[in-house]
Image (cartoon, grey):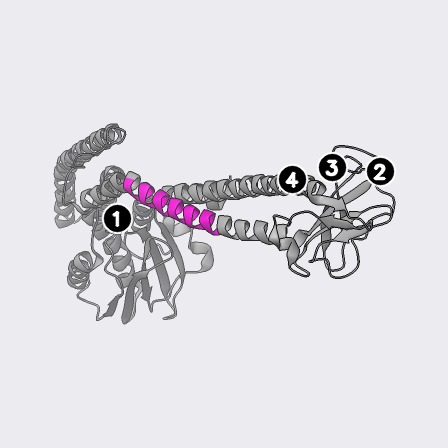
Amino acid sequence: MTPAFSKMSLRKRMVTASVLWVTLGAVIGYWLLSSAFHTHVFKQFYDELDQHIVELENITQLDENGDFILVSAFSDTKYDTPDSGYYWEVRGQNASLKSPSLSGKPIALADEGFDHDIAAHRHKIKGVDDVLLVVEKTTNFHSKNGEYRRFILAVERRHLAEMISEFNTTLAWSFVVLSLSMMFAAALLTSFALHPFKRLSEGFKNVRSGKTEKLDGTYPTEVTPLVGELNAHIASTSDMLKRARAQAGNLAHGLKGSLAIVADEGYKLEEEGLVRSSQAIIQQCNIMQRHIDHHIARARASAAAQLPSTFSNIEDVLPPVITAMKLLHSDKDIDINVQVHTQKPIHMDKIDLNEILGNILDNAYKAAVSRIDIVCSKADGNHILIRLDDDGPGLPTKAYDVVFDLGMRWDETTPGGGLGLAIVRELVNLYGGTCKLGKSPLNGLRVDIILPFIDF
């Protein structure tokens, strides 16, 4: 099976198979009927010539002068029209007679006829303009003096060819009309049979968009079990997501309280003059907080990525993140240029998209001098590209992979725990996207995040 056929839709497969089958059947049917008609026409033709031979034999006699004469008119008038293509001829030892249609030379046969035989002989010879189909018989049955007579009938093959051609033309058009009507019927039947799957697809879109929580409606008995299994899967995934979020929230609540107490003790040490110890404790508390955030985000995203109704709109999530970054980095005057060229919803939980945008924008703020550009556009396939450029110092190429590792920073003088980009890449990968770094046209760092979108 070719890759192109494997990717073909069920509708196209069924219609293609129907077209091929109908076409094959029409070709075979045409060939069988044409062959049967061809055989029937030739058999009927020769049977008719055999009858004409007998008739010609019965109405032919010798007159007083020894010449052949017809005692009655020949029944088929086609032999009376000159050059009609229908000819007969009677040959004897001293006389001959030919039909009015044979205005030219006699039929070109061998001088010696067949031996005395009751049965007629059939063969073909080359005529002046066309092949002649010949039936001849040599007999002395009606001869008074025992002389053998040779009765010959010849018909130009074009008459049968025209008849067969007319039949084949009519037959071909009949099969064309029949085939087209059958193909059209097959297309209608295919559309009718696949209509439940179209409703199933629309139901999935409603689930993914959050309009409904499960697949509703009545389906054929063959599809109903599938719908039931899908609804059960959606329900179990939703329950799993709720449990994951609850567990993550409980874990965050339990650990944040303890970290707050430790951090508070660190600040107290600072007030008592133990600055070095205080800074170390506070720094480690921040690192632990980032680790907690990372694993909580990972647990939440692992569940949300499996839920079809999970989606976010970049134009809803991005403005609050930018506002928060401006407040967080109020000491820097950064010009942020935002361009959103697509309205497609991203297949990602809003909290996770907020986490990703917050991390990359926070890093950009720390590095930028005066400008950050954010562009959101449609990428190849069903994906959206979120591109962020800054005019900071950027990173060397060899640092592009290092900074994605958990706890790793390229510039140790910059504050942070080295978890931001690690969280970004892990979240993006969980949702089936990609994240990569590059050189920005602003001479700083470029961050490209590609995520799948939902096409409602």
Which one is earlier in the sequence, the residue at label 1 or at label 2?
Answer: 2
Q: Residue at x 39, y 55 (%)?
A: 436
Q: Quadrant of residue 374?
A: bottom left
Instruction: Tell me the CA gap for discs 4 and 3.
Output: 10 Å
- Select label 4 or label 2 by which is in front: 2
Tell me which amino acid carries mark 4: Gln
In screen coordinates, is 429 left or right of 134? Answer: left
Residue bearing the label numbered 1 = 347
Which one is earlier in the sequence, the residue at label 3 or at label 2?
Answer: 3
Tell me which amino acid carries mark 2: Asn
Q: Residue furthest front?
A: 64
Residue bearing the label numbered 3 = 120
Nearer-the-camera pick, 124 or 377: 124
Residue bearing the label numbered 4 = 51
The rendered magenta stretch, by its main secondary structure, is classed as helix
Which one is earlier in the sequence, the residue at label 3 or at label 1?
Answer: 3
Residue bearing the label numbered 2 = 145
Q: Residue at x 65, y 48 (%)?
A: 72
In screen coordinates, is 124 left or right of 201? Answer: right
